[in-house]
Amino acid sequence: MDRYDRLILEALQQDGRISNKQLAAEVHLSESACLRRVRALEETGMIERYVAMVSQKRAGLPGDVLVHIGLHREEQSELAAFEEAVRNIPEVMECYLMTGEFDYLLRVVVADMADFERIHKEELTRLPGVARVNSSVAIRKVLKRTALPLR
């Protein structure tokens, strides 16, 4: 990845709908060279996809809850069963396998605390292998970045 690829990626991270003409002008390349580079970035998987950033608040899901999950056992089959099941909970926006005291960290979006109580009772505690659930409610979002720092 060279300087032009980084410039293209930085511009696309800010506006995924920018036209190739505008993008080429912004990164100082011809339109054909710019388009070739964008297609190469897509084909290599550097650009995974293009998405719309939907307002969490306007979508009626203003709350974030960070949930630590501890499993009974850390056997591969139990991890796989948990991961397959957690993918089916639409409110779980992110899930990370962790080191430390808990096995997983989830970011769950909720409408309100009653909504989280429902998700906790009907979904999270019923996931395969769950031994412990520890939740922290975010008071407010201080920082949310969507653009990766490219070097």
Image (tube, grey):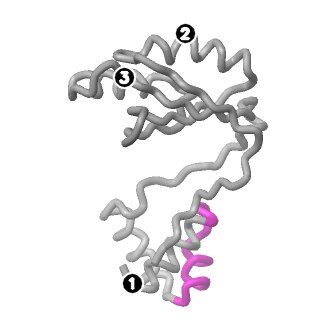
Check disc 3 and give the amino acid type: Leu
Residue in view at x 55 percent, y 30 percent: 67
- Furthest toward the front, the residue is 101
Decide which of tag 3 and tag 2 comes sooner along the chain: 3
Question: Can you give x and y, in whole percent of width and height, for residue 59 in the image?
Answer: 73, 33
Is residue 25 highlighted in magenta?
A: yes
Q: Position of residue 138 (x, y in %)?
A: 70, 38
Query: Of the numbered discs in the image, which one, if any, rests on residue 71?
Result: 3
What amino acid does circle 1 point to?
Asp
- Seen in the picture, residue 126 relative to 3 is either above or below; the reply is above
Residue that numbered label 2 is attached to: 122
**Residue at image mark 1:** 2
Query: Looking at the picture, how far across and down is residue 44, in whole percent?
Result: 30, 64
Q: In this rendering, which labeled residue sits more in front, label 3 or label 2?
A: 3
For residue 96, side relative to residue 110 (left or right): left
Q: Magenta residues: mostly which secondary structure?
A: helix
* Residue 43 point in image, percent of width and height: 32, 63
Query: Residue shown at 56%/50% (left/top)?
Result: 51
Residue at 64% x, 49% y is 53
Q: Is residue 71 above or below residue 105?
A: above
Mark 3 neighbour density, 10 Å: few (under 14) some (14–19) many (20 or more): some
Q: Which residues are magenta?
A: 14-28
* C-beta proximity under 8 Å, tags 3 and 2: no
